[in-house]
Each structure stands twice: as structure tokens, then as C-alpha cells.
Image: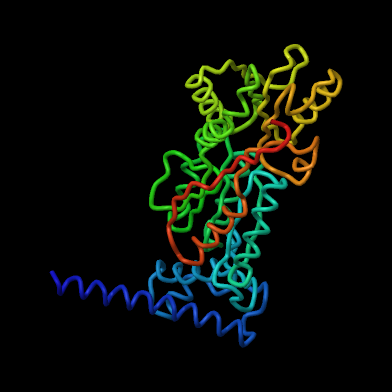
Amino acid sequence: METKNLQENRDSSVQRMKYLQLVDHILQLIERSELQLNERLPSLKQFEHQFGISKETVLKGLNYLLEKGIIESVYRKGYYVRKKSVDHSFRIFLLLDKMNLMRDKFYHTLFEAIKDKADIDVYFHHHNSKVFEKLITENIHSYTHFVIAAYLKEDVSTILNSIPAPKRILIDFDQAHLQGNYSSIYQDFKSDIYDALSEVEAQLAKYKQLILIVPPEAFHARLVIEGFLQFCQEHQYPYIIQHEISSANFYRGNVYITFSRYDTDDVALIKLARRKKYRLGEDIGLISYNDTDVKEILEGGITVISSDFEAMAKKVAETIEGKKIIRHRNPTKLILRNSL
């Protein structure tokens, strides 16, 4: 048995050496300008014959160069030289749902944390599963790590499982049905709202009713609702769940929780409060999702439930640099201000 294992280890070492020899050979051709930028590499069969190696070993070497960004694959045409040298150890495929203040903060923190060691390419799927699949499929061999915010209503586990587990890092929301040992730095939306409301239970005592404003298109609405209902039912707190701010039931004594994409519900609530001459933080309350500089000063300060996107980005950088697999609930905090 030991002899067999030793032979397997030797075979594995030889295989590794062969594909690295191919890598070194291609890099030397590029450095000596025998292969120019945008020039096509020899075919797989040419490499097989030249080095006396299998197609699998050739592909292993080419995939190594693809991940480093040295070459690129063009469908049905072959492999082409993309750049002359390996500038960084890592190439990161960052796939976001959209760009907003939170995503911008995440990106810039990640960039600053790892800019000396990694190249980062940013893509957006805009909650479109076809775009999501196309972007991943076309880039599956071109990056060392895939950092993905998979906010889609469709089950995209099959697409995500096509990414080797050690390269896969999910952010914000962990998906079901995923295989392998992968990293996830996620928000626990159900626990976050429950914990936040529990933290301000004393402030809520002066109000009569909690109203959760749930945009119908919000991806994580179900989990937020579950946490909200758990709090209200455990504390026997009167509540309403509705899709938008409405003047029909806008009364003194209500506390509103909003998480609309562009903070339109916050604006609508403040306009109604001014019209009815209600004082925010006394006659009605407001808790909004995700902190911004505007919310810090608007109406004397808006109370927020906000995940720490800078901490999320730093944890992603730690995962990549340390070559670790991490499953980590990202910290979310409640910032108490004048609106409650």
C-alpha cells in the first residue's frame, strides 16, 4: 500500500512538473517576443507532440495561464496572448447585482486591501439569471477567485457549482444546494432585524404599532419578514406589513421599517410627516436599512440597521490572501438616531 501511494505521489509530482514546464515555455516565448500580444498560441496537439504530454496536462498548463490573465481563450479559435507578465498573484472575478453606495464601499475596501496582490474585474448581473450564467460560463477558466453576490429569484446553484469550490466566495447571501467546501461571508437577514428590534425595545415602547414596508421585488424580503414576525409575535406587538408608504393608515404612534432600493419610502414618509406636522422620533418612528452620510444628518439623523460592508470586503481579502475557506456571518449593527 505504501509503495502504491509513493508511486502515486511521484506520478503527481511528474505531472505537475510537466504542466509547469509548459507554462515556463510559453512565458519564455512571450518574454522573448516570439509570441506577441494578441498572437495565437500553438494548438493543443502541437504542445502534446512537442512535450510528449497528454491533452489533460496541456489544458492544466493553459488554465494556469488563463487564471493569471496571461492568455485568453477565444471560442473555436484557440488561445491568445493577453499580457506579457504576471503582475499579481490573484485575479478576482467580482460579480455584483448592481452598483450602489453599499456595493461601492465594498469594492473600494476590497481594492485597497488587496490591490498589491490582485487584479479585480467587476461585472453586474442586474438580477438577470441569463446574464448571470453567461458571465460565469464565459469566464470560468480566467480567474483564481470568484466573488459573487447572487441575488436572483431563480435557483442558480447549478451555475455556482460549476465554479470549483475553493475558488467560490459568496457575499451577502448564502445559497442553498451548493456543493464542496467554499467560502461565504453572508448577512443573516432574519436574525439581523430580530436582534436590531430587540436592541431598541425600550425606544419602541412609546409607539403603538410597527409597520414593515416590503418592496415586492426585494430579494431578501421573506427572511426580513420572518425575523420581523418573530419579534412582533414574541413581544405581542401590533404590526402591519405593506408594500409602500400610504397616507391611508399614516397615524401618530406608528414605527416604520423601510428597506427600499433607492430610499424612496424614507422620502415619502418624511413628506407625509411634514404635511401632518408629525415630529419624527416623537409622533412617529423610522428605522431604515443601510447607513449613508445623508441618513446621518437628514431630519436630525435616521436610525438604521446596517451591515458592515467594509468588514465584509476585508474578510474576503483575508480569505483570498490566506488561501482559507471561511463561513462567516457579517456583522450588522443598529445605529440609534433621532428618528426613533
Tell me the quarter of the picture where residue 70 sits. Answer: bottom right
The residue located at (59%, 68%) in the rendering is 118
Q: Is 240 positioned to the left or the right of 279 in the image?
A: left
Residue shown at 75% from the left, 17% from the top: 246
Give the vertical position of 90 relative to 28 (above or below): above
Residue 113 lies, in percent from the top left, at 61, 65
**In this picture, is 268 found above or below 80?**
above
Percent of width and height locating residue 195:
52, 35
Residue positioned 62% across, 25% down in the render:
204
Q: Percent x, y for residue 261?
A: 70, 35
Nearer the observer, 59 or 325: 325
Q: Kindly indicate the quadrant of the structure image that contains residue 218.
A: top right
- Apparent side of residue 71 relative to residue 339 in the rendered image (left or right): left
Give 295 or 138, whichever is nearer the viewer: 295
Q: Residue furthest right?
A: 275
Residue positioned most to the top: 248
**Which one is nearer the viewer's eye here, 6 or 53?**
6
Q: Position of residue 32 (x, y in %)?
A: 61, 88
